[in-house]
Every structure is written in structure tokens, then in C-alpha cells.
Amino acid sequence: MYRNLSVLLYGEPVGELLQTDEGYTFSYLPDYQGHPLSLSLPVTSQPDFSVQLHPFFKGLAPVWAHPFCNGRPQPARGTDLYHKAL
């Protein structure tokens, strides 16, 4: 499997996210010199590889894109302070 996605910031292209059978790679465009997408994704010329999708990108995906949620919002297990207080 091979899929790529253009990553935009305020409508301007800043990088590319690539999914392969081995994992995910995010790379900023060679000429990009703006703000980083996240403090955990500093602007660098080196690609960022991870076996799992980087939490920054995972947090942007809509709920229906997460197969483990069955299309419904899920509380954060073990960290839901509101329901622990009840």
C-alpha cells in the first residue's frame, strides 16, 4: 500500500504525509521556511518516520476515520476526570 497526502497550513502547502506498509513519513517541502505544524514536528530537511501515525495528524482525523471508535466519540479511558469525579 502506498498513499500520499499534501499537508496544508492556512491553505498553503507545507509538506507531504506518506503512508506505506512500513509506516508513515512526514516531510516538509524543501523550500518551506515557515512555522512548524507542531512543536513535536519542527521544520527540518529530514523526513520524520513513525510506524504509527504521528499524534498530531491522528488528532486531525475525523471520528469516522478511526475504525476503533465505530463512528462515535469515545472518552479517553483512564484520563476522563469529569466522569471519575461523579
Image (spheres, rainbow, N blue to C red):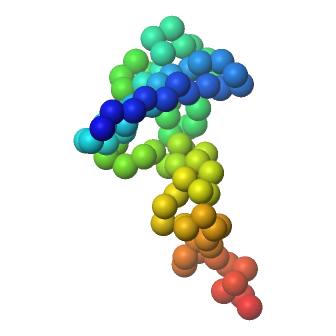
Which x, y percent locates residue 66? 52, 58
Instruction: Decide if residue 46 is on the left or right side of residue 72.
Output: left
Work out which residue is located at the far left of the displayed protein and give it.
Answer: 22
Which x, y percent locates residue 72? 63, 68
Q: In which quarter of the image is the C terminus?
A: bottom right
Say whether residue 40 is visible.
yes
Which residue shows up at 47% across the image and 25% down it? 16
Quarter where residue 17 is shown: top left
Viewer-proximal residue among 74 and 71: 71
Which residue shows up at 59% across the image and 32% down it? 37
Viewer-proximal residue among 74 and 34: 74
Instruction: Decide if residue 40 is on the left or right side of residue 13.
Output: left
Work out which residue is located at the far top of the displayed protein and give it.
Answer: 31
Quarter where residue 39 is shown: top right
Which residue shows up at 62% across the image and 51% down it? 62
Up-down: is 74 above or below 31?
below
Up-down: is 42 above or below 73?
above
Which x, y percent locates residue 63? 61, 57
Which x, y percent locates residue 34? 61, 17
Q: Quadrant of the N terminus?
A: top left
